Amino acid sequence: QVEVVESGGGTVQAGGSLRLSCAASGRTLHIDAMGWFRQTSGTERDIVARVNWSGSTIYGDSVKGRFSISKDIAKKAVYLEMNLLKPEDTAVYYCVANEFGGNVYWGQGIRVTVSS
């Protein structure tokens, strides 16, 4: 089994920055990608950013140019640098770890609040 744990959320003023961290532990041998999704009340979970172990990245349209994802393969960790934050970035952010072969593991979620 794989456990995914997020950290670093909180409250920040609009225009500020925040860094989220996520680490996977347990049977992580076959993990080959990790990323972040976010969800607000009453909406679907949307992709924020994703990186695979080859270095390819994907970003949601609303965060391009403001957010940056990085990885530490040895630690099975990913980090999300969030800059120029907007009130509409307020959400619960979920980290996800993808295994080669299709298994997906989600974290419990961490709240980010951007005040105007």
Image: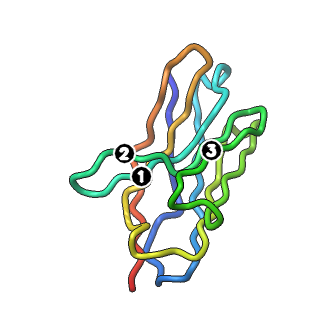
Q: CA distance from mark 3 to mark 1?
A: 14 Å
Left/right of residue 23 with respect to residue 53 in the rendered view:
left
Q: Which of 62/6 is in front?
A: 62
Q: Residue 20, position in %: x, y?
A: 57, 59
Residue at the far top: name it: 101
Quadrant in which the C terminus appears: bottom left
Say which residue appears at 72% left-offset and 45% top-offset. Answer: 71
Task: Kindly identify which residue carries mark 3.
Answer: 58
Task: Kindly identify which residue carries mark 2.
Answer: 45
Q: Do the CB atoms of the residues marked 3 and 1 lie less than 8 Å apart? A: no
Callout 2 crowding tier (Cα within 10 Å): few <14, some 14–19, many ≥20? some
Q: Secondary structure at mark 3?
A: strand
Residue at the far front: name it: 61
Which of disc 2 and disc 3 is earlier in sequence?
A: 2
Task: Kindly identify which residue carries mark 1.
Answer: 38
Q: Do the CB atoms of the residues marked 1 and 2 lie less than 8 Å apart? A: yes
Mark 1 is on which residue type? Arg
Mark 3 is on which residue type? Ile
Q: Residue 77, position in %: x, y?
A: 66, 43
Left/right of residue 52 with respect to residue 38 in the rendered view:
right
Q: Which of 11/39 is in front?
A: 39
Select label 3 or label 2 by which is in front: 3
